[in-house]
Amino acid sequence: MTNAELARSVAAELGWDPRIGSARIDVAADDGRVTLRGTVGSFRQKREARRAAERVHGVTSVTDQLAVRLPGEHRRPDADLRAGVRRALSLDVLVPPTVQASVTDGCVVLSGTAGWQYQRDEAVFVAGNVRGVVDVRSDIDLLTSSRHAGDVAASITKAFERDAEIEAANVGVETLDGTAILTGSVRSWAEHDSAVAAAWAAPGVGDVDDRLTVTYY
């Protein structure tokens, strides 16, 4: 697939996804590396545009340079937006009460602590869905329990073997001081995301060093 063909495929996928709507997005491709430029009407659209690009066969990485330009009716004072984000977080059972939120110029900063990566991910997802948010940054600390590194690596490998989306033989796992290091290649971004999620789910993992490459066979 040429760069022009890949760019057209990504643009077609962006236009196909109704969650992205009529956002003004320009697509450039260079040897599998895709760059998105332009403006979108919400942080949710920005996030969905990246996901849509990653779904396209042939895409090996996505650089998101999209800017969020809120319609006038979606703009909210920071105090009102902060209250809306905090309420949304409090209503989600997956977000622990130790997660806090502050807002400056529509940009949300999440802080506090969580026991699992999925809780941090959920907090970012929920905050990004609130009307008026233009960006979300996570400064949530992950509290992990200590466990022998070999046990962690073995448990992650077992999780890979159970997951139908992951070709476990192609993904290597090492652990160092609570960090899971993933190496090797995967066949799609869906497989990549499944592998990273499985690594984060292991007890004792405080960080994931993602060195995976997306390779299309």
Image (cartoon, rainbow, N blue to C red):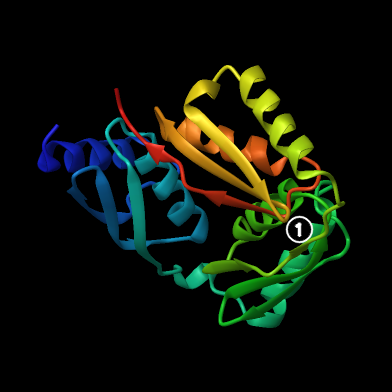
Residue 101 location (% of width, % of height): 74, 72
Q: Is 154 or 165 nearer to us in this picture?
A: 154
131 with respect to 20 (left or right): right
Q: Is 92 or 162 nearer to us in this picture?
A: 162
Regarding residue 134, the answer to whether it shows in the image is yes
User: Residue 113, located in which quarter of the rendered image?
Assistant: bottom right
Q: Compared with residue 216, is residue 202 higher up or lower down, i.e. above or below? A: below
113 with respect to 56 (left or right): right
How many residues crowd around disc 1 within 10 Å: few (fewer than 14), some, or many (20 or more)?
some
Q: Secondary structure at mark 1?
A: helix
Q: Measuring 62% from the left and 25% from the top, which residue is drawn there?
A: 160
Q: Measuring 29% from the left and 22% from the top, which residue is drawn there?
A: 217
Regarding residue 133, the answer to whether it shows in the image is no
Residue 15 location (% of width, % of height): 30, 40
Q: Compared with residue 133, is residue 166 higher up or lower down, i.e. above or below? A: above
Q: Amino acid at mark 1?
A: Ala
124 with respect to 98 (left or right): left
Residue 182 location (% of width, % of height): 54, 42
Residue at image mark 1: 88
Q: Compared with residue 103, is residue 215 higher up or lower down, i.e. above or below? A: above
